[in-house]
Image (tube, rainbow, N blue to C red):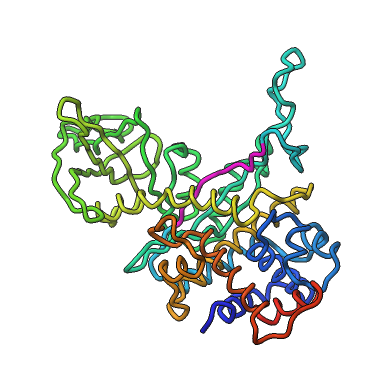
Amino acid sequence: MDIFSTLNAVLGLFRPLFNSQGYALFCAFILGFIFNPGRKTVTGVYQASGSKKRYWSFVKFLSRGKWDADIVAQQLIKLLQGVFKKWAYVYDETHATKTGKSQFGLHFFRNHKYQKRNRNQSKFHWGQQFAALGLLCVCASQAILFPVWAKMFIPGDATLNSLAVLESILSHIPIGLIILDRGFNNRKVFQVLLGCGHHLLCRAKSNAAFYYPPKPERVPKRGRKKKYGKKLYVPSMRFRDVLVNGQTASVTDALVYTKMCPQLVRLVVKRTKPEKSRTYKYFLVYTTDLTLPVETILHYYRLRWELETAFRDTKQNFGFDEYQVNSHLSISRFVQLSFVAASITQLLFANPQVNVNIDEVSKTLGIHWYKPSKLTRGLMQAYIRYLWLRELFSAEKSLFTNSQKNHEALIKTA
């Protein structure tokens, strides 16, 4: 099975979510994000998609189309979880920053700190803010992070703020482990997450305090029972050597309480000493899933950084921040489609029937000046675009005389 047959089969799984015209425009957007080598604006997507629809159909598909971006994200998550049996979620927030450029849709993000006396401050924020969810799929040979859900939020809005968007996402996904950065160490965030039935895995801040469970009192006393026992002192803990990702690490763990989380957590501490003359450095991470082994906890949090690279790749290669639409609904839908295009591209290469490795991609693209260690999203997109161009201009096909025939051949190939 080749890549284009797999692409057609994957796109067909989203068919029940759209009407006939909406499905054609959905496929056109996905193909435009993948095949367009330039900017992924609505115009760029239209030119590269090969769709027979008019240009304004693309704009109306984002602003007035009868489809739900959240249901599309849920369908993508269901598809990936059906393929990979071992997975975890990664949640983070990002900006679409365009410093010094004209930014579309900034009237949603008025900067309330602006003062008339201070003329150096901008009246609007630079770029919109998004909540993003990634699905970390772990298999025997590798770990792949798929960007699956992006939702725009408005700071200061009671219904579209960061906490409300987090709750709307976590309440519509299957229960699992949520990996968070240490910037989310907040009791309100953890209450929302645990209230939806999920487990959390988060890094602790440098000033975080942990407490042992209280010891049972010999003589019962009046009043409320103690929740926190003796305060934990990390350097006094007993460390042991374990094998994490093929390397020996000095770690320890304990069941403790913290005021940031309402439940009992497992704290895992990893210590390192770069130089003998210096003191130890401690890396603290904790989770509410008490069944996870220490090695798995450290391995999962190390893979959290993959979401940051997913932000970078979707912005550079899949048009995450290149929208040129104004409304809140259109921006959210555009960004969600860019996430879907990036995840589908990764899923094509994760299919064992396609069987494309890094050596074949480097040889096909003529990459000889460096040796990449793994297939990045940019290399995947470049390889698919090369195959598409080779199909269009192969000697076995008749020569095309205009762009319309090129677009029709693209649709037949995909």
Residue 338, image x, y percentages = 63, 58
Question: Is residue 115 found inside the magenta-colored segment of the image?
Answer: no
| Residue 404 found in image quarter | bottom right
| Residue 407 found in image quarter | bottom right
Residue at x 18% of width, y 34% of height: 217
Residue at x 22% of width, y 56% of height: 246
Residue 280, image x, y percentages = 21, 31
Residue 31 drawn above or below residue 218: below
Residue furthest top as drawn: 117
| Residue 185 found in image quarter | top left
Residue 206 drawn above or below residue 88: above
In the picture provided, is 409 more to the left or to the right than 177?
right
In the picture provided, is 209 more to the left or to the right than 29?
left
Residue 264, image x, y percentages = 32, 44
Majority SS type along the magenta span? strand
Residue 157 drawn above or below residue 348: above
In the picture provided, is 80 more to the left or to the right than 323?
left
Q: Quadrant of the C terminus?
A: bottom right
Q: Which residues are magenta?
A: 89-98
Q: Nearer the viewer, residue 161 or 246?
A: 246
